Image: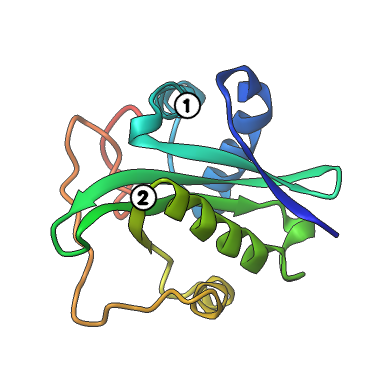
Amino acid sequence: MKVQLRRGELHQLAEILPLVGAYHGFEHIHSSACARESAVRQLLKNPHLGQLWLIDVGTELAGYIALCRGFSIEFNGFDAFVDEFFLLPEFRGRGFGKLVLTSIADEARKLDINALHLEVARDNHPARKLYAGAGFKAREKYLLMSLMLNNITDPENNEGGNI
Protein backbone atom coordinates (compact mmCIF):
# COMPACT_ATOMS: atom_id res chain seq x y z
CA MET A 1 0.00 0.00 0.00
CA LYS A 2 1.08 3.53 -0.72
CA VAL A 3 2.00 5.90 2.10
CA GLN A 4 1.39 9.59 1.49
CA LEU A 5 1.97 12.69 3.59
CA ARG A 6 -0.54 15.56 3.39
CA ARG A 7 0.39 18.91 4.89
CA GLY A 8 -1.99 19.62 7.71
CA GLU A 9 -4.16 22.70 7.37
CA LEU A 10 -6.31 24.57 9.84
CA HIS A 11 -9.55 23.33 8.28
CA GLN A 12 -8.45 19.75 9.10
CA LEU A 13 -8.48 20.19 12.88
CA ALA A 14 -11.36 17.71 13.18
CA GLU A 15 -9.09 15.05 11.63
CA ILE A 16 -5.94 16.04 13.47
CA LEU A 17 -7.08 16.59 17.06
CA PRO A 18 -8.39 13.04 17.73
CA LEU A 19 -5.03 11.68 16.56
CA VAL A 20 -3.13 14.07 18.83
CA GLY A 21 -5.37 13.05 21.73
CA ALA A 22 -4.75 9.37 20.98
CA TYR A 23 -0.98 9.96 20.84
CA HIS A 24 -1.01 11.85 24.13
CA GLY A 25 -3.02 9.01 25.69
CA PHE A 26 -0.58 6.41 24.32
CA GLU A 27 2.42 8.32 25.69
CA HIS A 28 0.67 9.27 28.97
CA ILE A 29 1.06 12.97 28.22
CA HIS A 30 -1.32 14.91 30.44
CA SER A 31 -2.91 17.61 28.31
CA SER A 32 -6.32 19.10 27.93
CA ALA A 33 -8.22 19.12 24.65
CA CYS A 34 -8.11 22.91 24.78
CA ALA A 35 -4.32 23.01 25.18
CA ARG A 36 -3.82 20.50 22.36
CA GLU A 37 -6.05 22.50 20.05
CA SER A 38 -4.23 25.72 20.90
CA ALA A 39 -0.80 24.21 20.20
CA VAL A 40 -1.88 22.55 16.95
CA ARG A 41 -3.54 25.78 15.77
CA GLN A 42 -0.33 27.73 16.44
CA LEU A 43 1.74 25.24 14.45
CA LEU A 44 -0.69 25.15 11.53
CA LYS A 45 -1.00 28.95 11.39
CA ASN A 46 2.78 29.61 11.59
CA PRO A 47 4.76 27.53 9.08
CA HIS A 48 8.01 29.13 10.23
CA LEU A 49 7.55 27.14 13.46
CA GLY A 50 7.34 23.82 11.64
CA GLN A 51 4.75 21.67 9.96
CA LEU A 52 2.32 18.87 10.66
CA TRP A 53 1.51 16.21 8.07
CA LEU A 54 -1.36 13.74 8.05
CA ILE A 55 -0.32 10.23 7.06
CA ASP A 56 -2.48 8.31 4.63
CA VAL A 57 -2.02 4.62 3.88
CA GLY A 58 -3.93 3.97 0.72
CA THR A 59 -7.18 5.83 1.28
CA GLU A 60 -7.14 5.53 5.09
CA LEU A 61 -5.95 8.12 7.58
CA ALA A 62 -3.20 6.32 9.51
CA GLY A 63 -1.67 9.00 11.73
CA TYR A 64 0.35 12.20 11.76
CA ILE A 65 3.86 13.52 12.16
CA ALA A 66 4.90 16.99 13.29
CA LEU A 67 8.25 18.73 12.85
CA CYS A 68 9.11 21.78 14.93
CA ARG A 69 11.84 23.94 13.47
CA GLY A 70 14.86 25.38 15.24
CA PHE A 71 18.28 26.75 14.40
CA SER A 72 21.61 25.22 15.33
CA ILE A 73 25.15 26.50 15.06
CA GLU A 74 26.36 22.91 15.48
CA PHE A 75 24.24 21.71 12.56
CA ASN A 76 25.01 24.76 10.41
CA GLY A 77 21.53 26.17 10.11
CA PHE A 78 17.99 24.94 10.53
CA ASP A 79 17.25 21.76 12.42
CA ALA A 80 13.96 20.29 13.58
CA PHE A 81 12.54 17.95 16.17
CA VAL A 82 10.16 15.22 15.21
CA ASP A 83 7.90 16.56 17.92
CA GLU A 84 5.17 13.96 17.58
CA PHE A 85 4.84 10.88 15.37
CA PHE A 86 1.78 8.69 15.75
CA LEU A 87 0.44 5.78 13.77
CA LEU A 88 -2.86 4.18 14.68
CA PRO A 89 -2.31 0.66 16.11
CA GLU A 90 -3.53 -1.14 13.00
CA PHE A 91 -0.75 0.49 10.94
CA ARG A 92 2.14 -0.30 13.29
CA GLY A 93 4.71 -3.01 12.65
CA ARG A 94 3.96 -3.16 8.93
CA GLY A 95 6.78 -1.00 7.53
CA PHE A 96 4.72 2.17 7.23
CA GLY A 97 6.66 3.99 9.94
CA LYS A 98 9.94 3.63 8.07
CA LEU A 99 8.32 4.91 4.89
CA VAL A 100 6.98 7.93 6.78
CA LEU A 101 10.43 8.68 8.23
CA THR A 102 12.01 8.48 4.77
CA SER A 103 9.34 10.81 3.40
CA ILE A 104 9.67 13.25 6.28
CA ALA A 105 13.42 13.44 5.76
CA ASP A 106 12.75 14.41 2.14
CA GLU A 107 10.23 17.05 3.26
CA ALA A 108 12.74 18.40 5.80
CA ARG A 109 15.40 18.78 3.11
CA LYS A 110 12.92 20.82 1.04
CA LEU A 111 12.56 23.12 4.06
CA ASP A 112 16.37 23.58 4.28
CA ILE A 113 16.56 21.56 7.48
CA ASN A 114 20.03 20.09 8.04
CA ALA A 115 19.30 17.72 10.93
CA LEU A 116 16.33 15.96 12.48
CA HIS A 117 16.17 15.06 16.16
CA LEU A 118 13.67 13.10 18.20
CA GLU A 119 13.00 11.74 21.65
CA VAL A 120 12.04 8.16 22.26
CA ALA A 121 11.27 6.41 25.52
CA ARG A 122 14.23 4.30 26.60
CA ASP A 123 11.96 1.29 27.06
CA ASN A 124 10.13 1.67 23.72
CA HIS A 125 12.25 -0.88 21.90
CA PRO A 126 10.05 -1.19 18.77
CA ALA A 127 10.23 2.60 18.23
CA ARG A 128 13.97 2.68 18.90
CA LYS A 129 14.47 -0.08 16.33
CA LEU A 130 12.30 1.82 13.82
CA TYR A 131 14.26 5.06 14.29
CA ALA A 132 17.63 3.32 14.10
CA GLY A 133 16.51 1.56 10.92
CA ALA A 134 15.65 4.97 9.44
CA GLY A 135 19.15 6.26 10.20
CA PHE A 136 18.64 8.05 13.53
CA LYS A 137 21.56 7.56 15.90
CA ALA A 138 21.66 7.98 19.65
CA ARG A 139 24.00 10.76 20.72
CA GLU A 140 25.34 8.87 23.70
CA LYS A 141 27.52 11.80 24.76
CA TYR A 142 24.44 13.97 25.34
CA LEU A 143 21.41 13.82 27.58
CA LEU A 144 18.33 15.83 26.68
CA MET A 145 17.33 17.99 29.63
CA SER A 146 14.30 20.24 29.91
CA LEU A 147 13.29 23.20 32.04
CA MET A 148 9.52 23.52 32.23
CA LEU A 149 8.28 27.11 31.88
CA ASN A 150 4.92 28.88 31.87
CA ASN A 151 3.08 26.48 34.15
CA ILE A 152 3.01 23.52 31.78
CA THR A 153 2.96 19.93 32.95
CA ASP A 154 6.27 18.17 33.45
CA PRO A 155 5.73 14.75 31.85
CA GLU A 156 8.25 13.21 34.26
CA ASN A 157 6.39 14.08 37.44
CA ASN A 158 2.91 14.95 36.17
CA GLU A 159 2.85 18.13 38.24
CA GLY A 160 1.98 21.56 37.04
CA GLY A 161 -0.66 23.15 35.20
CA ASN A 162 -2.80 23.64 32.31
CA ILE A 163 -1.79 21.16 29.67
Judge left or right: residue 8 versus residue 149: right
Image spot of residue 28 (x, y percent)? 48, 50
Which numbered disc covers residue 44?
A: 1
Between disc 2 and disc 1, the foreground one is: 2
Residue 115 picture quarter = bottom left
Neighbour class for label 1 at 10 Å: few (<14), some, many (≥20)? Answer: many
Give me the residue at 50% from left, 59% from top: 105
Cα distance between the residues tagged 2 and 1 = 19 Å
Image spot of residue 113 (x, y percent)? 35, 53
Q: Secondary structure at mark 2?
A: loop
Furthest residue to the top?
Answer: 11
User: Residue at label 2?
Assistant: 112
Judge left or right: residue 152 versus residue 118: left
Q: Secondary structure at mark 1?
A: helix
Along the viewing direction, whichever of 71 and 34 lies nearer the viewer: 71
**Which of pointers 2 and 1 lies earlier in the amino acid sequence?**
1
Q: Amino acid at mark 2?
A: Asp
Give me the residue at 59% from left, 58% from top: 103
Residue 82 picture quarter = bottom left
Give me the residue at 49% from left, 23% from top: 37
